[in-house]
Image (cartoon, helix red, strand yellow):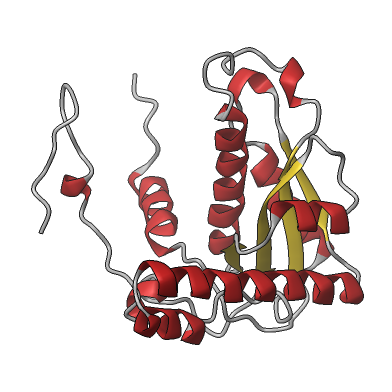
Amino acid sequence: MSFAYSDQDKAAIYKVIAERRDMRHFLPTPIAPELLQKLLQAAHQAPSVGLMQPWRFIRISDAGLRKRMHALVDEERKKTAQAIGEFENTARMADFMRLKVEGILDCGELLVATLCDQREKYIFGRRTLPEMDLASVSCAIQNLWLAARAEGIGMGWVSLFDPQALADLLGMPADAKPVAILCLGYVNTFYKSPMLVEQGWATEKPLSDMLMENGWQHKPQP
């Protein structure tokens, strides 16, 4: 007995994985509420350690709040550029400042993915690896990303923000934590390659560079 999907279904799964992109350019077209609910349901079906389901999603529907979040991201963008300049060089800092790093003011829907509060009570699978709650939220974000791509919706993960400042802005409990600002929306086109590759910021490494067997092997650096 085979539990494998049909060849057509398998091809669709591999296709959506390969064509998922971290999007920064959006159209202002609204996303229908029923489609947004469908995408969030896909996120909610993600695996989680100990079935703790630590994800919480905050939908941002207030235009003023969206602008304040954009200001937080822009502040961190400048600080990140400064840090890159100090760690690498000023030319690299200038390259970073030319990148479009978010679409907060452009996208049709804006979400904040967060870790829940009272996480300390969840011990199953986290006693020695407490960060597994973050891994679980990441699985939910990936589910949302793949479902969005399948529906023709672009999504961008924004991590340029001060977590405490964003938590304060959103009135979050002290033991909850924002993980990602997620921009969702229709797009003119999906990037053929990751945007950072297209913009010459970074290059993708092959799987062979990441794969080891029976232990950690140090590979020569180029």
Residue 26 position within the rendered picture, expressed as x and y whole percent measured from the top left = 63, 80
Q: Is residue 98 shown left or right of residue 68? A: left
> Where is residue 204 shown, x and y percent of the image?
27, 63
Depth order, front residue of 17/122: 122
x%, y% of residue 207?
A: 22, 48
Question: Measured along the vertical axis of the image, is residue 206 above or below residue 51?
Answer: below
Q: Is residue 167 above or below residue 119?
A: below
The quarter of the image holding the C terminus is bottom left
Q: Image point 52% across, 15% down: which residue?
A: 128
Report the residue at 17% width, 33% height from top. 212
* Residue 19 relative to residue 185: left or right: left
Which image quarter: residue 217? Answer: top left
Residue situated furthest front in the rendering: 86
The answer to whether 15 appears left or right of 121 in the picture is left
Depth check, front residue: 1 or 122: 122
Quarter of the figure with residue 109: bottom right
Against 141, residue 196 (above or below) is: below
Residue 193: quarter of image: bottom left
**Of the pair 94 and 135, the residue shown nearer to us:** 94
Identify which residue is drawn at 76% across, 16% down: 121
Write the residue at 43% across / 79% down: 93
Q: Is residue 151 visible?
A: no
- Residue 215 relative to residue 191: left or right: left
Above-or-below relation of 109 to 144 = below
Quarter of the image containing the N terminus? top left
Q: Nearer the viewer, residue 64 or 28?
A: 64
Instruction: Give the percent coordinates (x, y) of residue 90.
Output: 39, 82
